[in-house]
Image: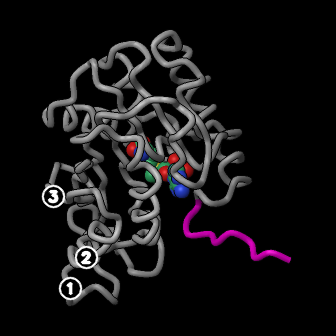
Amino acid sequence: MPNAAPRYNIYDDPDLMRQAVDLGQHREVIGGMWDELGALQTAFLIAQGLAPEHALIDIGAGSFRAGMKLVPYLDAGNYYAIDLQASLLWAGYTREILPAGLAGRFPPQNFAANADFDISGFGRKFDVGIAQSVFSHLPIARLGDCLAATGPYFQVGGRLFVTVFLAPDDAADRPYRQMPGGFVTSPTNDPFHTTLKALDRIASQAGNWHMAVIGNWGHPRNQQMVCFTRLR
Ligand SMILES: C[S@@+](CC[C@H](N)C(=O)[O-])C[C@H]1O[C@@H](n2cnc3c(N)ncnc32)[C@H](O)[C@@H]1O
C-alpha cells in the first residue's frame, strides 16, 4: 500500500475543505480578513510595479481573496491561479467572481487545482507571481519545489513574491511568537516558520532565482515578504 500524502495543515484535507465550503465558509477558511488582505496584496503588487498588461499567477489562491481585487486591475485574461483544493477555487469562482461580473476577465481555463505547483498548462510565461500565506502553512522545503516547478514559466526578470513567517536563528528549532498577531509558529507544525539562512539555502539550491528579502509589508499577522527574481 502506498503511504498516504502527508497532512501539514487543514488545506491538505479535501473533505474538511468541502465541508467548510458547504457551510458557506470559503472566506473564513482561507484566513478571513477578506477585504483587508485582498487589498493589501493588490496595493503591494502595484507598488512593486505590477501593471495591467502583466500576466500574474496567484499560487495557492484559495477563493480569490486577492483575485477579487486583481482581476479588475489587470487587463482581461491576465490573472491566473492555482490551488491545492478545487473546492476553494470553485467556491470563489461561483460565489465571488461570477456575481461580481468578472468572469469575462477571468475565464475558468485561467485556474487549475493541483498539488505540485504545476503552472505549465496555462501556455504562457508570467511576469509576476504571488504566494501569500501558502508557505506559512507548509514545511519550507515545499518552497524549493515551487521554485523548481514554476521557474520555467516565468519571464526572465519575472518576480515571484512569497510570504513566510521568519524566526531568528536562535529560535529556529523552537516555537516562536509572531508580533503583531500573536501566532506561535513552529519549525515542524502549522503555522510554520523558517529562517533567513534556510531561505538562502533554498534559493541557492533552486538555481536560476535571485532572492531578496523585502521583510515587513504591513501584514497584520507578521508574515514577511520575500521576492524571487528569475535570472535567465
Ligand atoms: C491561507 S490560504 C491563502 C489563500 C490566498 N493566497 C489568499 O491570500 O487569500 C492558503 C492556501 O494555500 C493553498 N495550498 C496549500 N498547499 C498548496 C499547494 N501545495 N499548492 C497550491 N496551493 C496550496 C490552500 O489550499 C489555501 O487555499
The answer to whether the residues at label 2 and label 1 have Cβ atoms under 8 Å apart is yes
- Quadrant of the rendered image containing residue 7: bottom right
Q: What residue is pinned by disc 1? A: 169
The three-letter amino acid code for the residue at tag 1 is Asp
Q: Would residue 89 appear left or right of 148 to someone viewing this image?
A: right
Q: Where does label 3 land, which residue?
A: 212
Amino acid type of the residue tagged 2 in the rendering: Thr
Identify the secondary structure beneath mark 2: loop
Circle 3 crowding by C-alpha within 10 Å: few under 14, some 14–19, many from 20:
some
The local secondary structure at tag 1 comes to helix
Is residue 13 shown left or right of residue 58? right
Residue 129 percent coordinates (x, y): 34, 41
Name the main secondary structure of what is drawn in magenta.
loop
The N terminus lies in which quarter of the figure?
bottom right
**Does 4 lie within the magenta span?**
yes
Residue at 22% of width from left, 78% of height from top?
197
CA neighbours of label 1 inside 10 A, class few (<14), some (14 to 19), many (20+) = few
Which of label 2 and label 3 is nearer to you?
3
Name the mark nearer the viewer: 3 or 1. 3
- Check disc 2 and report the residue beneath it: 195
Q: Marks 3/1: CA distance?
A: 18 Å
Residue 22 locus on image (x, y percent): 71, 39
Q: Name the residue located 42 percent from the left edge and 35 percent from the top edge.
A: 65
Q: Residue at x 39, y 81 (%)?
A: 187
Please indicate, yes or no, whether residue 213 appears anywhere in the rendered image.
yes
